[in-house]
Amino acid sequence: MVKLRVNGVSRQYNGDPNMPLLWYLRDELGLTGSKYGCGAGLCGACTVHVDGEAMRGCITAIADADGKDVTTIEGLDPKGNHPVQRAWRAHAVPQCGYCQAGQIMQAAALLSRNPDPSDQEIVDSMDGNICRCGTYQRIFAAVKTAATEV
């Protein structure tokens, strides 16, 4: 049995411990903010926090979250007012929006461990998250703005 906390709520899962965490979050808990993109951990659309670290939910087995805290976009700030979310709105970052939950979660993890990242640290941290609409300049600007608020 896998025991974990998702967005602050204690959970138990008795199924296949190798099931991707993303499937558990979306299919079992109905937390659909994290998206399925590539299924190989390459695009970042499924990014969630596991004990505060950005992880790709599509390649993280639920067993790897045993005893840990998992935060999804729904739990980052229940009202959508985390500094990164506010900066995303201020910079009108989303275009199609598909990658945005993963982008936001990646940025929030960066700023929680490094509240004053250099430009290169932002680029390096966000590099694994793909935006098919190409809003990278707005993403960068939003991360810079959020860094002034954390």
Image (cartoon, rainbow, N blue to C red):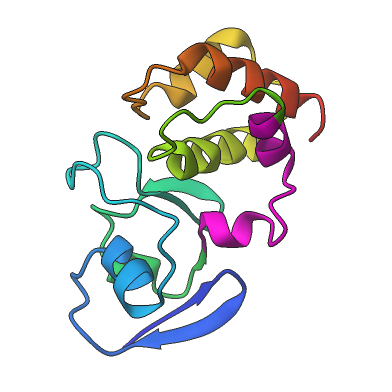
Q: In which quarter of the image is residue 115?
A: top right
Residue 111 seen from this side = yes
Residue 85 falls within the magenta-colored stretch = yes
Q: What residue is shown at x 44% (from left), y 42% (from top)?
A: 102
The region drawn magenta spans 71-89
Frontmost residue, 49 versus 67? 49
Q: What residue is shown at x 73% (from left), y 26% (from top)?
A: 147
Q: What residue is shown at x 18% (from left), y 70% (from top)?
A: 18
The image position of residue 116, as x and y in percent, is 73, 22
Quarter holding the N terminus is: bottom left
Frontmost residue, 47 versus 131? 131
Residue 63 falls within the magenta-colored stretch = no
The image position of residue 73, as x and y in percent, is 54, 54
Q: Is residue 98 above or below residue 2?
A: above
Q: Quadrant of residue 74?
A: bottom right
Quarter holding the C terminus is: top right
Q: In this view, does 16 lie above or below 81?
A: below
As drawn, the residue found furthest toward the front would be 96
Q: How many labels does the image show?
A: 0
The image position of residue 7, as x and y in percent, is 58, 69
Q: What residue is shown at x 28% (from left), y 34% (from top)?
A: 43
In the displayed structure image, the side of residue 112 where residue 12 appears, left or right: left
In the displayed structure image, the side of residue 16 where residue 150 appears, left or right: right
Residue 114 seen from this side = no
The image position of residue 6, as x and y in percent, is 52, 72
As drawn, the residue found furthest toward the right would be 149
In the displayed structure image, the side of residue 43 where residue 39 appears, left or right: left
Q: Is residue 6 above or below residue 74?
A: below
